Amino acid sequence: MVEEPKYHESGFYLMRYRLRHYLAEYFGTLVLIFLGSSVVALVFLNPDVESESWLLINFAWGIAVAMALYVSMGSSGGHLNSAITISAAVYGKLPWHRVPGYIFSQILGAFTGSALTYGVYRSRFDPFDNGVRSVSGPTATGGIFCTYPNPYNTHWDSFFTEMLLTAILVFVVQGIFDPEMTPAKGFEPFIVGLLVTAIGMTTGRLTGSAMNPARDFGPRLFTAVSGWGSAPFTASGHYFWIPIVAPVIGAILGQGAYGLFIIPNRD
């Protein structure tokens, strides 16, 4: 049992201290989604930046990941991702009783981050889509917040892609933070951000590279209650479940593969 702090005796401080893991996951995910979805809104709603949009989007998402990790790592471990949370619990790195609180905080943070992006860019939506919120077509705006697959993908294509990308993400992250390897001490958030940028630049046009159930479900829920109707959940053959399930399987496989096959040199 973790000993309660003997300083700052106010009840409000003690409450925040007991909730510190969940507050860090909430605010870290909020920062991640606000910065990430805002750069997508910038590109979608401002055609004049279209020429460099792919680089801009992926580098901004990478920076968003780094900033979100700096906010949360010291308190919660900086999961910011429900697949990583579940995988950590599966391998004994996180107590199971914390999992529901982590996931709820991540989804709520993602929902709030989306709401803030919408608030900042709200005046630009109506001129772009004439007040008709949609997830497909030339004036679709749903993709600003959550992911939708390439129309040429089958569900199996998308499922495999999300599972594989999440496995690679978690596999490499294990090496970045492994003290027995060559960890980038002090620079871990930026290296993880570069990893996310690399994944997005190479495969992002296939599924949007969700790799994170909370990152996709929170914003999808926001759009469903903010004018996009049921389309975020019914579009692309009810695609919404794939960015929830596939990353969890991928994270478990990625973390397991690292522990099984990567052995530090102890000679």
Image (cartoon, rainbow, N blue to C red):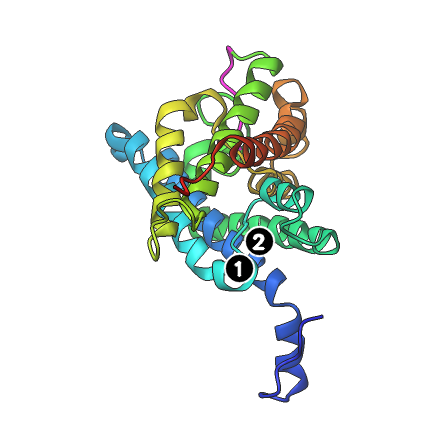
The number of discs equals: 2
- Specify start and end residues of the magenta stretch as a single range: 147-152
Q: Secondary structure at mark 2?
A: helix
Which amino acid, mark 2? Answer: Gly
Which amino acid, mark 1? Answer: Phe
Placement of the N terminus among the 4 image quadrants: bottom right
Nearest the eye: 45 or 167? 167
Q: Which mark is residue 109?
A: 2
Residue 146, horizontal then vertical, whole percent: 54, 35
Nearest the eye: 255 or 72? 255
Give the residue displayed 51% in from the left and 37% down from the top: 170
Tag 2: Cα neighbours inside 10 Å, few (<14), some, or many (≥20)? many
Residue 32, horizontal then vertical, whole percent: 46, 49
Can I make out residue 10 in this image?
A: yes
- Residue 124 sits inside the magenta stretch: no
Nearest the eye: 223 or 199? 199
In the depicted structure, whether residue 108 falls above or below residue 232: below
Asked if the residue at tag 2 contacts the one at tag 1, i.e. Cβ–Cβ closer than 8 Å, the answer is yes
Residue behind mark 1: 27
In the depicted structure, whether residue 81 falls above or below residue 16: above
Q: Secondary structure at mark 1?
A: helix
Q: CA distance from mark 1 to mark 2?
A: 6 Å
Nearest the eye: 165 or 221? 165
Can I make out residue 130 in this image?
A: no
Give the residue displayed 44% in from the left and 22% down from the top: 138
Residue 230, horizontal then vertical, whole percent: 68, 31
Placement of the C terminus among the 4 image quadrants: top left
